[in-house]
Amino acid sequence: MNMNLPLITVNGVLGAQISPMDRGFAYGDGVFETCRVHCGKITFWALHLERLLTSAERLKIPIAEAQLLTYRDELLQLLSTAQLESAVLKITITRGVGGRGYGLPQQVAPTYCLGVFPSLPLLSDQYLQGVAVRICSQRLSQSPALAGMKHMNRLEHILARSEWGDEFNEGLLLDVQGNVIEATVSNLFLVNDGCLITPDLTLAGVAGIMRRLIIERFAPELGLNVVIRSVDIDVIGGAQELFLCNSVFGIWPVVHLATAPMLPSTPGAVTRSLQHCLTESFK
Amino acid sequence: MNMNLPLITVNGVLGAQISPMDRGFAYGDGVFETCRVHCGKITFWALHLERLLTSAERLKIPIAEAQLLTYRDELLQLLSTAQLESAVLKITITRGVGGRGYGLPQQVAPTYCLGVFPSLPLLSDQYLQGVAVRICSQRLSQSPALAGMKHMNRLEHILARSEWGDEFNEGLLLDVQGNVIEATVSNLFLVNDGCLITPDLTLAGVAGIMRRLIIERFAPELGLNVVIRSVDIDVIGGAQELFLCNSVFGIWPVVHLATAPMLPSTPGAVTRSLQHCLTESFK
């Protein structure tokens, strides 16, 4: 069966649209997840669900988990019918329709918007040969109440991404204090003497699922220590290896960075080992 | 003619909805204005339009001004048919429909969403007798690239507003450094010895139209100096008068503030004079 993507449901209805009174539209009042679908299954679903529920709780959005799972299963069923091998699933949950004004509606009925998008193969050129990365001028603000979440207020990331076209694969983001935080759609790791270093995200940034997997599962499997701390831009230039990660593209070795000409121009051994952990986890 | 509000058009179509692929929905990627409509006319329209165009330019959203004016006029025509004396007009403009990801679409067709909402009379109890204000725990992040704009990334304001119910009329917002910036839906002025002081909004906050009117028109009319500077929370407690302002409710005297028990419990003379300037400007 041929299937035109994206395929989007709103509250379970295929092709439905969003009310202009939806608070997701009015104020970016919601959260989202972007997951890789592989052979009909959502990879690392439990972690995505956990982040979604935790973030919604921080924002006081009452997600109905059973409802979400129903919508998810209906969409996966459509994918299965189409025999689509791999795809990207985006789940957006907002505080639903409300009145004018910031005050929370008395009765909140969240909006569940699920979309299936085409995906590139995991073993892309970027995955295999590495990527070129720049440093963005746009800084991230520090907001402890919002840090770590994949919420829908993304203007800073949009402005950062608008700084370049196709000449780089990603851009690093610093916060207003000059700490390196992440890249526009991915998290950053440094490798030094068998130790992984990744920026602290207490004040800014999105705590990615692939970042969590590397910290909690792949690094221990490989006997690598992980240090989460503030990272200065100068430290990056001296790293033995650098890589980026997210749930969709997996792990990308960084082989070119404007400020670090001494970076090896081929993917490093530790990055390769972590990629191996990832592909093994898909089996 | 009886008319049920809100009355909302999307790209000129009454009752239309928003695509789930709209970047306003996905990322809060847009700007909005909230204006008071009085006797069929949008008050201070030129200033609202100017802020809209300036903000869109900062966000690289190519607003088609003629298109916007057409949609505006069609909606005002509907109001005129209904002989609606006063209302609130909300104009939302987003970067329109795009793909998944933060990168700007190659061809941007902005979404124009215009809504008419019921309004309270300008001469409300709050306007006449003053309001009670609290201090919010939620802080505003500092983001020079976004400060001043009425953009659609409003999670911090939503979290702030969720801290209380009906027991106060407004809540003051400090930034992460502890500077007083604004209230959740209005700007703040202090009055001291015939001088107006209002917080600097270079790093955070929304530069309101009523604030601008007071600074550029009403204060000069009354021979009052205006100082725009960083404002410490302690300074507020010692102010002779305090007031809040926005385009919808006008000017509200503050007569109760948790941290300033010495504040006069009736509206001050300077605040009254500014209110007089405002009501005169409606004639």
Image: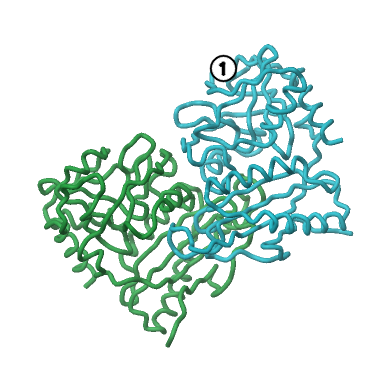
Chain colours: A green, B cyan
Q: Position of residue A151 (x, y in %)?
A: 45, 52
Q: Image point 15% across, 61% down: which residue?
A: A272
Amino acid tagged 1: Val
Determine the secondary structure under disc 1: helix
State the residue in front, B19 or A258: A258
Quarter of the image that includes the N terminus of chain A: bottom left
Q: Position of residue B189 (x, y in %)?
A: 65, 25
Relative horizontal placement of residue A125, taking residue B147 as reference (left or right)? left
Q: Is residue B237 above or below residue A81?
A: above
Q: Is residue B83 above or below residue A74?
A: above
Quarter of the image that includes the C terminus of chain A: bottom left
Q: Position of residue A3 (x, y in %)?
A: 45, 82
Relative horizontal placement of residue B33, taking residue A124 as reference (left or right)? right
Q: Please, which chain is the residue tagged with disc 1 on?
A: B
The quadrant in which residue A77 appears is bottom left
Q: Image point 20% across, 66% down: which residue?
A: A128
The quadrant in which residue B282 appears is top right
Q: Is residue B233 above or below residue A162?
A: above
Q: Image point 66% across, 46% down: which residue?
A: B33
Q: Position of residue B214 (x, y in %)?
A: 71, 28
Q: How many marks?
A: 1
Dot 1 crowding, Cα within 10 Å, few <14, some 14–19, many 20+? few
State the residue in front, B75 or B140: B75
Relative horizontal placement of residue A44, taking residue A73 as reference (left or right)? left
Q: Which residue is mark 1?
A: B235
State the residue in front, A262 or B117: A262
**Can I make out residue A133 in this image?**
yes
In the picture as drawn, the residue positioned furthest to the top comes out as B193
State the residue in front, A96 or A248: A248
**Can I make out residue A216 in this image?**
no
